[in-house]
Image (cartoon, helix red, strand yellow):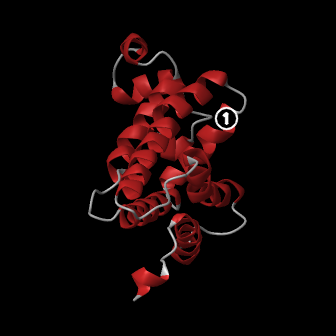
């Protein structure tokens, strides 16, 4: 229903009618439409944007961001845009979005960056919040503003710029 009518027109009563259950059943599980929409979003997105775990943290980040960008090009992106937009006027939606969607992804990215530091792929003095914003901010900005697409070329270029900037420089001895 989120894809069909959007978050703004979604109602728990409408969900109950479509599911063929009473409103009380829906309200027992979800106190408001924000919590219902968040659970639906997490079920759709969660498994699709988990970080792979290979020997290279850099490759894991690149692959995860490509998967996320692909989702954001479709119906998931439209739902995320709507939830971000509406959360600007609804503190509960913002809390649910940050606590259940954004913060877990920030923590997962931090773990991959820490693994990259331990493997020597990334510099040890990273500001994780800044790196996260640099990696994901351009995608979210394009998704929200729609001034340009979230194409693979753009994603690969901006991710490479960020990751190259946090990769330790090779010394002359390492190059020989």
Q: Residue at x 48, y 33 (%)?
A: 37
Left or right, residue 12 beside residue 42: right
Q: Quadrant of residue 39?
A: top left
Q: Nearer the viewer, residue 175 or 85?
A: 175
| Count of number-bearing discs | 1
Q: Nearer the viewer, residue 54 or 49?
A: 54
Q: Quadrant of residue 150?
A: bottom right
Q: Quadrant of residue 44?
A: top left
Left or right, residue 13 beside residue 144: left
Q: Nearer the viewer, residue 75 or 49?
A: 49
Q: Residue furthest bottom?
A: 176
State the image coordinates of residue 158 (x, y, percent, origin top left): 59, 70
Dot 1 crowding, Cα within 10 Å, few <14, some 14–19, many 20+: some
Q: Residue at x 62, y 69 (%)?
A: 149
Q: Nearer the viewer, residue 146 or 27?
A: 146
Residue bearing the label numbered 1: 86
State the image coordinates of residue 31 (x, y, percent, origin top left): 48, 15
Q: Residue at x 68, y 40 (%)?
A: 85
Q: Residue furthest left?
A: 54
Q: Residue at x 63, y 40 (%)?
A: 84
């Amino acid at each position: 229903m989120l894809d069909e009518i959007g978050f703004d027109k979604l109602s728990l009563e409408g969900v109950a009618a479509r599911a063929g259950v009473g409103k009380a059943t829906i309200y027992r599980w979800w106190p408001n439409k924000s919590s219902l929409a968040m659970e639906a979003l997490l079920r759709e997105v969660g498994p699709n944007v988990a970080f792979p775990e290979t020997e290279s943290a850099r490759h894991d980040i690149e692959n995860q961001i490509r998967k996320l960008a692909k989702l954001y090009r479709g119906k998931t992106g439209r739902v995320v845009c709507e939830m971000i937009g509406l959360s600007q006027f609804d503190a509960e939606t913002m809390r649910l979005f940050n606590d259940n969607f954004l913060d877990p992804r920030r923590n997962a990215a931090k773990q991959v960056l820490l693994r990259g530091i331990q493997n020597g792929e990334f510099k040890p003095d990273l500001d994780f919040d800044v790196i996260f914003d640099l990696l994901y901010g351009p995608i979210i900005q394009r998704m929200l503003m729609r001034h340009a697409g979230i194409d693979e070329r753009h994603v690969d270029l901006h991710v490479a710029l960020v990751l190259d900037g946090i990769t330790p420089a090779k010394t002359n001895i390492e190059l020989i």
